[in-house]
Image (cartoon, grey):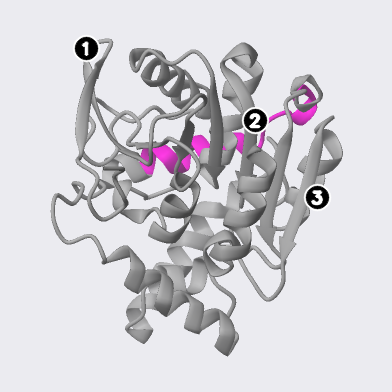
Amino acid sequence: MAMTFETATTKAIDVSGTSFVYREFGEKGDVPVVLLHHLTAVLDDWDPRVVDGLAAEHHVIAFDNRGVGGSGGSTPTSVEEMARDTVAFIRALGLSKVDLLGFSLGGFIAQVVAQEQPDLVRKIIIAGAGPAGGEGISNMGAVLQDAVAKAGASGKHPKHFLFFSQTSNGQAAANAFLARLNERKEDRDAPMSNETIGAQLTAIHAWGRGDPSKLREIHHPVLVANGDDDVMAPTINSFELARRLPNAQLSIFPDASHGGIFQYHAVFVQQALDFLR
């Protein structure tokens, strides 16, 4: 029986002497979709509707990169090193071709994987992200800190402020999303450490000061998605990705922020499935 977000077993694999944890969803097929996650996220932070929606037609693999959640080792302080760990994990699974879905920090990692290992990648979906040197990306740590303060003062979750618009529709979507993240009751992932969050922020800050010129080398088909008012990776960066990438299409969701693909999960899944076909 195909595993779902709620039932998939957490597995571990040795990657050059370090244990990486992962979960697989759906039936194994030709080209799996590997999910690359955001700042502060572990396996349980993927939206079940997105995971299960993709798994209806694809073999989907989510994993914790080095130092994240239940995976061992220390988290690198550069996106490039995170991308190399991603490649090592994919190779350790014995895979020779994958599709990538990178959200936020994962979208940065996906770009580097495609640049450094183009033959490993078939298609790419980049959501809530931007190019190296993108507008406002180096400020993501300050935005996170501000949202944590607002959450503490209001009794809400930081994702209410980071991932969703402040309209009634956006906040209702935030509540629904957070409820979905709690659907899995057993075998939940280890929490994120402060050391890992610090390393990720260092990597993101450097990415925000990087050089986007190598994007022209990515000739893979790319679907770029975002909300129309992303407060973490400002939406202009998604337009810039679509402009710079030679073979890209762009999807912008209305009245949505960084987590637009979760707010509009049904529409996004359909767009992703159409793109991957």
- Coordinates of residue 95 in the picture (x, y in percent): 43, 16
Left or right: where 52 falls relative to 11? right
Nearer to the camera, 46 or 239: 46
Q: Nearer the viewer, mark 1 or mark 2?
A: 2
Q: Is residue 219 above or below residue 71?
A: above
Residue 98 magenta-drawn? no
Sequence-first disc among 3 and 1: 1
Dominant SS in magenta? helix
Residue at x 28%, y 10% (from the top left corner): 16
Marks 1 & 2, CB-CB < 8 Å contact: no
Tag 3: Cα neighbours inside 10 Å, few (<14), some, or many (≥20)? some
Where is residue 57 drawn, in percent x and y? 50, 43
Residue picked out by circle 3: 239
Q: Earlier in the sequence, mark 3 or mark 2?
A: 2
The residue lying toward the viewer, choosing from 183 and 28, is: 28
Disc 1 element: loop
Residue 9 occupies quadrant: top left
Q: Quick one: quadrant of the C terminus?
A: top right
Label ID, residue 123: 2
What type is the residue that disc 1 sits on?
Gly
Residue 54 sits above or below residue 235 on the image? above
| Spatial CA span between label 3 and label 2 | 19 Å
Q: Quadrant of the N terminus?
A: top left
> What span is colored magenta in the figure?
198-214
Classify mark 1: residues with Cα within 10 Å, few (<14), some (14-19) or many (20+). Answer: few
Mark 2 Cα within 10 Å, few/some/many (few <14, many 20+)? many
Task: Give the residue drawn at x 79%, y 38%.
Answer: 248
Residue 206 lies within the magenta run: yes
Viewer-proximal residue among 55 and 212: 55
Residue 17's mark? 1
Mark 3–mark 2 contact, CB under 8 Å?
A: no
